[in-house]
Amino acid sequence: MHIRNVGIVGFGDIAKTYLQALDHCPMLRLVAITDIRPVSATDIPPGVQFFNRAKDMYQKSSIDAVIIATPYDTHAEMAIEAVFSGVDVLVEKPIAVRRNEFSFVASTALEQDRLVVGALHARYGREVEWFLKNHEDLLKKVPPLTSFLVRLNDPYMKNGMVTTNKELSLGTPWLDSGINALSILNSILAPLDVSELTLESVGNVGDVFEFHTLGTYSFTTPWNKKGKGIIECSWGEKSATKSTRLGFADASSIVLDHGKETVQLIDSGENVVFYQDCRNDRPRLVNHYVRVLGDFATALQTRISNLDTMREINTHFFAVLDEIENLKKVTA
């Protein structure tokens, strides 16, 4: 496999995670970084060029592909600029915050014969991948699925206000974590034979509903069994909670703890009857992005992106954004 030269657009916190992950991806070689803000020379890895404008990086460096790690509301614009500059693109989630933006990114990539790949990092959690590899044995121990609860919550608010500019750069909990929740479900519900996932309603807790979003879903399992599911994305928690709980007909559950990288089977009495620790010696997010970059390297070789998966996930992602806008109008 040919080693590809890559650049990074945007040198914030997530770019630092990419730097760590790139150390474990021999088929991708970082050669350039660009950011509109001044960056200390000591922060730039040796041998890597730094540019203040993405345009200059595209013109003056030898990159084959670029990683878009800018604030959420610039992803689509930055991806389109990269595609028109003739490079393939890995884009942080969400690729776009509007349907027409996503459609334009996808159509432009097709017209320009460039790859655009969404960085669905949450689906690469070690606990998610362990479940996917071992689900057959685990599911023999439980009856059909009846519910799910995905909670991706962070302590980013104090006294009803977002605390720092870092969190403001993420937009809202749904913009930051909704794609993560949906990408996890897209992975783990398939082996459970779940179909017809349908958004029923969007609610909120508290006054600032954009910062505590509850999406309620219905779904169908084999033999036309119906189930209910909830995705909760909040910034008003006292501590981070990142988990997926799959509930079954006998009141047992399988819990994937995305923060601790563990999988548990819990019986109806809340007793842990199986426990799998999936951690290794790397930080959780570095594990995610090592896998993201590995799949991106493969996509560069095969010329196959994940835009079809992104379209499927975005159907639900944009549906919730629409309902949030409707709620804002009603309460205005």
Image (cartoon, rainbow, N blue to C red):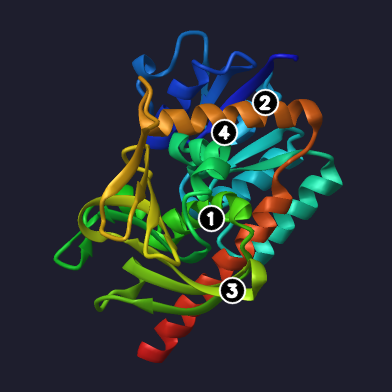
User: In the structure shown, which secondary structural element does the residue marked by tag 4 occupy?
Assistant: helix
User: In the structure shown, which secondary structural element does the residue marked by tag 2 occupy?
Assistant: helix
> Which residue sits at x=68%, y=52%?
309
Which of the two discs, 1 and 3, sits closer to the camera? 3
Front-lying residue, 305 or 80: 305
**Which of the marked residues, 4 or 3, is nearer the chain's N terminus?**
3
Disc 2 marks which amino acid?
A: Ala
Q: CA distance from mark 2 to mark 3?
A: 40 Å
Q: CA distance from mark 4 to mark 1?
A: 17 Å
Disc 4 marks which amino acid?
A: Val
**Which of the marked residues, 2 or 1, is nearer the chain's N terminus?**
1
User: In the structure shown, which secondary structural element does the residue marked by tag 1 occupy?
Assistant: helix
Q: CA distance from mark 2 to mark 4?
A: 9 Å
Front-lying residue, 60 or 181: 181
> Which residue sits at x=45%, y=76%?
324
User: In the structure shown, which secondary structural element does the residue marked by tag 3 occupy?
Assistant: strand
**Which of the marked residues, 1 or 3, is nearer the chain's N terminus?**
1
Q: Which residue is mark 1?
A: 185
Disc 3 marks which amino acid?
A: Lys
Neighbourhood count class around disc 4 (C-alpha, 10 Å): few under 14, some 14–19, many 20 upward: many
Which of the two discs, 2 and 3, sits closer to the camera? 3
Q: Is residue 304 left or right of residue 91?
A: right
> Which residue sits at x=57%, y=18%?
25
Q: Which residue is mark 3?
A: 225
**Which of the marked residues, 2 or 3, is nearer the chain's N terminus?**
3
**Which of the marked residues, 4 or 1, is nearer the chain's N terminus?**
1
Residue situated furthest top in the rendering: 47
